[in-house]
Image (tube, rainbow, N blue to C red):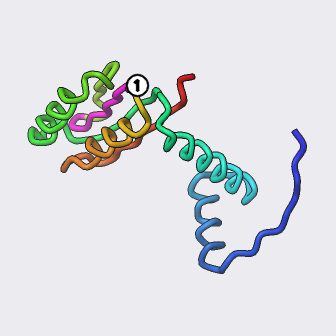
Amino acid sequence: MSVARFGVSLENELLEALDAYVQDNMFPNRSQAIRHLIEKNLVEKKWKCNNIVAGAITLIYECNKLDTQLRLSEIKKKALSEILSVQSLYISENKILEIIAVKGTSHKLTELSDAFIGIKGIEHGKLIMSKVD
């Protein structure tokens, strides 16, 4: 694949943020980071078109917090048409990694993911989607 070179002018704060992004994500250089950000933006733009997508919602939380588990269960019951499967894995004595396989419109899955991630007690959460057709 051929590449085109171009110059970019950034304020110092943005350049520092870009360099931090490069380092945090272990990109070999700024070009790779910018390429990744552009591709990510294009994918997210496609998601906003409300296409049918499939993906996974990953969550990390402490297993001894009953309120968190009850709230997770409530949301899962309301989203049975979008949830394909749920896998819970103990990653330590008191932490669970939960992977929720989902399929539906991008808008609905984003809302569902936000609902899960917004639960008090969820330490980390992320939605990954890919267009189905």
Q: Quadrant of the N terminus?
A: top right
Q: Quadrant of residue 93?
A: top left
Which one is nearer the viewer's eye here, 17 or 82?
A: 82
Per the rendered image, the range of residues in magenta is 93-103
- Of 105 and 101, nearer the camera is 105
Using residue 77 as the reference point, say whether residue 91 is left or right of it. Answer: right
At horizontal 20% and vertical 34% (from top left) the residue drawn is 75
Q: Position of residue 106 (x, y in %)?
A: 44, 36
Q: Residue at x 87, y 58 (%)?
A: 5
The kind of secondary structure the magenta stretch mainly shows is strand
Quadrant in which residue 58 is drawn? top left
Measuring from the top left, give residue 80's x and y in whole percent: 25, 23
Q: Which residue is mark 1?
A: 103
* Residue at x 30%, y 26% (from the top left corner): 89
Above or below for 126 versus 9: above
> Of the residues shown, which amino acid type is indicated by label 1?
Lys
- Would residue 54 appear left or right of 40 to someone viewing this image? left
From the viewer's perspective, tell me whether residue 3 is left or right of residue 116.
Answer: right
* Percent x, y of residue 109: 37, 36
Quadrant (top left, top right, bottom left, bottom right) of the C terminus? top right
Q: Is residue 95 magenta?
A: yes
Q: Is residue 132 left or right of residue 29?
A: left
Secondary structure beneath dot 1 equals strand
Residue depicted at 72% across the width and 52% down the height: 32
Q: Is residue 48 magenta?
A: no
Could you say which quadrant of the image residue 84 lies in?
top left
For the residue carrying disc 1, how many other residues have a C-alpha within 10 Å: few (<14), some (14-19), or many (20+)? many
In this view, 4 is above or below 107:
below
How many marks are shown on the rendered structure? 1
Question: 32 or 90: nearer the eye?
Answer: 32
Q: Residue furthest front?
A: 49
- How far across and down, in percent of the image, does residue 92 sit? 28, 35
